[in-house]
Image (cartoon, rainbow, N blue to C red):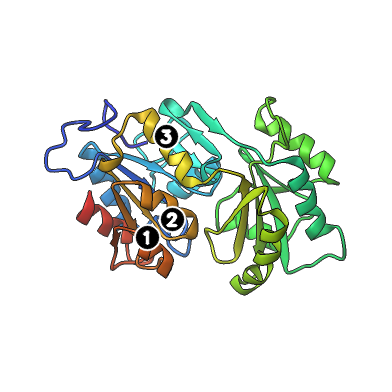
């Protein structure tokens, strides 16, 4: 990740800097609709790092997807914003890595929820307008391949969803991917993808009533619904990492656009909503950008608030 030699407040001498740490969402924030980082934003990030600001990613994406997304502007690897050797918050705070990319925190879904969710989608007649995949560390697993899941890989950079014969086999694979110390399903989150936001809006009440007491239900992208282990969200993951890095919350700028960013934006010293964020997100943020993810909103955020 981009950071000065010493972590924490004033890393590299704060000078005229307003912040010590910049936390960035990916989809709808750092990435444009083509899921790439544009040159002006990449340049602003490099300048930010040169000034000694710690920059890390907080995303719903799996870590390999975040690395591939950053690679669209050469910001992966050493000296970039994300790598296997740098801090970051992935899979909505369910996969958190600290200094040198060492694992800090992992959470997994209850097995019964995983079983019921896959039954709901694939147990009866196949609804071809939706697809469900399970995020298991650096891998994704499903029960049926689907063009939507292909798009999740080709456009959104996510790991390829491997189809398994049944939920029991999928869970065995997920537990292995989790690293052998799984207490539950080994699945970190479930992602339901539809062709349109309207179809997800129609599904959501049923999913909330079925799983609400046992899980968190959230959205990062309009045509996707995400199911997370209870008590977990991106904000919790970000808090865990900031504590580990010994960064003062008041000196943190976070930028986001989605429902899943709400907690993070409220928690930090300066929560910034993208110009393309929804009304609820803009209302929760301390600052709102003029620019969107199509017009280098993150560069505007760095210029104004970091």
Outermost residue on the left side: it is 15
Q: Nearer the viewer, residue 302 or 186?
A: 186
Residue 207 image point, x, y percent: 69, 60
Residue that protrudes farthest toward the bottom in the picture: 198
Label 1, secondary structure: give it.
helix
Q: Residue at x 54, y 37 (%)?
A: 95
Q: Which residue is more in the foreground, 282 or 22?
A: 282
Q: Secondary structure at mark 2?
A: helix
User: Residue tagged by mark 1?
Assistant: 284
Residue bearing the label numbered 2: 262
Give me the residue at 46% from left, 29% from top. 101
Report the front residue among 291 and 285. 285
Judging by the rendered image, the residue that carries numbered circle 3 is 241
Q: Earlier in the sequence, mark 3 or mark 1?
A: 3
**Disc 2 and disc 3 in contact, CB within 8 angstroms:** no
Among the 4 quarters of the image, the one containing residue 232: top right
Is tag 1's residue or tag 2's residue first in the polypeptide sequence?
2
Q: CA distance from mark 2 to mark 3?
A: 17 Å
The residue positioned 41% from the left and 38% from the top of the image is 239
Q: Secondary structure at mark 3?
A: helix
Q: Quick one: label 2 or label 3, which is nearer the N terminus? A: 3
Mark 2 closeness class: few <14, some 14–19, many ≥20 residues within 10 Å: many
Q: CA distance from mark 3 to mark 1?
A: 22 Å
């Amino acid at each position: 990740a981009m950071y000065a030699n010493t972590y924490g407040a004033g890393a590299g001498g704060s000078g005229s800097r307003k912040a010590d740490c910049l936390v960035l969402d990916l989809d709808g924030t750092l990435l444009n609709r083509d899921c790439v980082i544009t040159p002006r934003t990449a340049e602003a990030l490099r300048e930010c790092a040169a000034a000694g600001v710690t920059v890390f990613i907080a995303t719903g994406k799996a870590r390999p997807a975040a690395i591939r997304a950053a690679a669209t502007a050469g910001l992966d690897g050493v000296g970039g914003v994300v790598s296997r050797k740098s801090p970051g918050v992935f899979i909505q705070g369910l996969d958190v890595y600290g200094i040198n990319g060492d694992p800090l925190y992992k959470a997994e879904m209850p097995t019964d929820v995983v079983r019921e969710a896959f039954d709901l989608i694939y147990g009866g007649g196949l609804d071809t307008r939706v697809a469900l995949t399970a995020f298991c560390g650096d891998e994704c697993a499903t029960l049926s391949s689907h063009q939507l899941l292909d798009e999740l890989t080709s456009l959104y950079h996510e790991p390829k969803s491997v189809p398994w014969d049944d939920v029991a086999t999928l869970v065995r694979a997920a537990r292995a991917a989790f690293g052998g110390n799984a207490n539950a399903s080994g699945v970190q989150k479930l992602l339901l993808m539809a062709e349109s936001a309207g179809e997800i809006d129609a599904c959501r009440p049923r999913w909330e009533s079925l799983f609400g007491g046992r899980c968190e239900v959230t959205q990062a992208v309009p045509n996707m619904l995400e199911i997370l282990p209870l008590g977990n969200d991106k904000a919790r993951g970000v808090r865990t990492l900031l504590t580990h890095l010994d960064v003062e919350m008041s000196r943190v700028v976070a930028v986001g656009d989605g429902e899943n960013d709400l907690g993070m934006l409220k928690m930090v010293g300066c929560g910034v909503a993208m110009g393309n964020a929804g009304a609820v997100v803009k209302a929760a943020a301390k600052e709102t950008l003029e620019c969107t993810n199509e017009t280098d909103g993150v560069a505007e955020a760095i210029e104004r608030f970091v």
